[in-house]
Amino acid sequence: MLVLWCPDWPAVAAVAAAGSVLTRPAAVFHANRVVACTAVARARNIRRGMRRREAESQCPDLAVFGVDEARDARFFENVAAAVEELVVGLEVVRPGLLAVPVAGAAGYFGGEPRLAEKLVDQVAAAAGVECQVGVAEGLFAATLAARQGTLVEPGRSAEFLAPLPVTELDQPDAERADLAGLLVRLGLRTLGAFAELGERDVAARFGRTGVLAHRLARGLSDRPPLRRSPPPELSLAESFDPVLARVDVAAFTAKKLGARFHAALADRGLACTRLGIYATTENGEQLGRVWRCAEPLTPQGVADRVRWQFEGWLKAAPGERPTAGVARLRLEPEETVEGRSLQLGLWRGSDPGAGPGEDEELAAERAGRAFVRVQGLLGPEGVVTPLLDGGRDPASRVRLIPWGDPREPAGPPDATWPARLPSPSPATVLEQPLPVQVIDEQGRPVGLTSRKRLTAPPHGLCVAGGPPRPITGWAGPWPVTSGRRSAGAQQARLQLLLAAGENEAPEAVLVLCSGTENPVWTVEGSYD
């Protein structure tokens, strides 16, 4: 496989979209960190992961851009079109990276070196950007070869990969990045060292993600070479009247088509890994592009690629764009794998630094629409979400926020509030405290002294005048104070452990005692 790679593509596309020149330092930022920068910026000590403030202090004339995948795809269409003038069977992996089968084209142009030279010259002349070409067996090895501008001889991909750092496995998802970090901590610092492990040992220790990475480290394809041919009826075709001539309309349509396309495959237990997007314009022009994906596509993934492709078609330079809007669109599953390759988890990791996956975003969007519909039936207070807030008592530490309202805490939740109850907090906080009575060993009510101490150790708890439930352990009291001092007011909280009854399991509760004479006890919450 031959891979053509355009270095720093997000930054190159951003500069082109702004009408600037590559001689000026430029960088693309996400979450205030550099994700891509031009060669000129790197020469000025700008690096990936650098904070924006530090980058601008290093290079005051740095041009700053945000992440825009549609922009990257739109400008990469020029590169794809230039490559397609020389070779057929092109597959876009992502904006900035494409792959083509090498055998036929290399024979036609007189060998792989000659083909690589032709492609580099063609892209520079037609698209005006620099690129590097690599050839190896499998997309992973060919991509790394492209980054080095290397043509690996047949059968030597594993040898080429062996000395490379194992951190090369960190693409394209967070799971792979976590695996690469774990392998480094285990002392497996190169792809060769990881490849020497037995496949069964890798499967037992690292699971499916580890087995896939192990195949790549050995120079094999990420998927077995024999895959079923997609049935023709799995193609999805749609005609449009009026025609699609605007990107925003196409994006809205792509979302619906992506869901239908994915559902049809899922019904047959399949998932798509190579997506063909073919369009016919109102004037009969035929457009087409194939997108290769490292992981099976989700509905949102299908919609994104259709939208990116429309960006490239409809916003191309004059003379290169279609002469009319798209009248018919066909989505073709060029390659499928079994549906278990797209098994979604019931739960996702809670790492706040990791961005959500495509399926998480889709689920969150569906949930949001459902919440809004419920609010339309029950009112704004019909759907609420909890927010950890600051406060002294358990009831004030959690607020219920109506869906859609700003989630801003009234006070810092981790502040050292005076008389704040120590952790753990009760699992259940009663909306209306339950009146009870706490007695000592002689059956007399337990109260508070003027110094907020107990008059006697608690021995039993009575609910609604019923028989006392033995108390087997207790902690406290913790004096309760408020922002306003009330003369004569005495309050304190205790944690009580109640013994098991006939039909009751042992239970831990939080109680509040108010007053020194004729004390009033209430249960505020319970612990799991």
Image: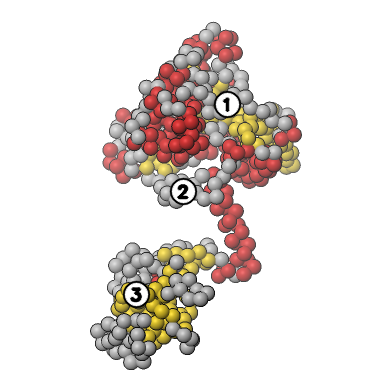
Residue 357: image location, x then y, percent: 51, 44
Q: Label 1 neighbourhood size at 10 Å, few (<14), some (14-19), many (20+)?
A: few
Circle 2/circle 1 CB separation < 8 Å = no
Tell me if label 1 and label 3 are in contact, CB under 8 Å: no
Label for residue 149?
none
Is residue 326 shown to the viewer in this render?
A: no
Q: Earlier in the sequence, mark 3 or mark 2?
A: 2
> Is 90 displayed left or right of 416 in the figure?
right
Structural crowding at the residue carrying mark 3, measured as other residues with C-alpha within 10 Å and reported as few (<14), some (14–19) or many (≥20)? some
Per the image, label 2 sits on a secondary structure element best described as: loop
Which quadrant of the figure has residue 469?
A: bottom left
| Viewer-nearest of discs 3 and 2 | 3
Write down the residue under mark 1. 224
| Nearer to me, 389 or 182 | 182
Distance from Cα at disc 2 to Cα at disc 1: 29 Å
Find disc 2 in the rendering and name its residue. 349
Q: Residues within 10 Å of mark 2 (few under 14, many from 20)?
A: few
Amino acid at the residue labelled 1? Pro
The amino acid on which the numbered mark 3 sits, given as a three-letter code, is Trp
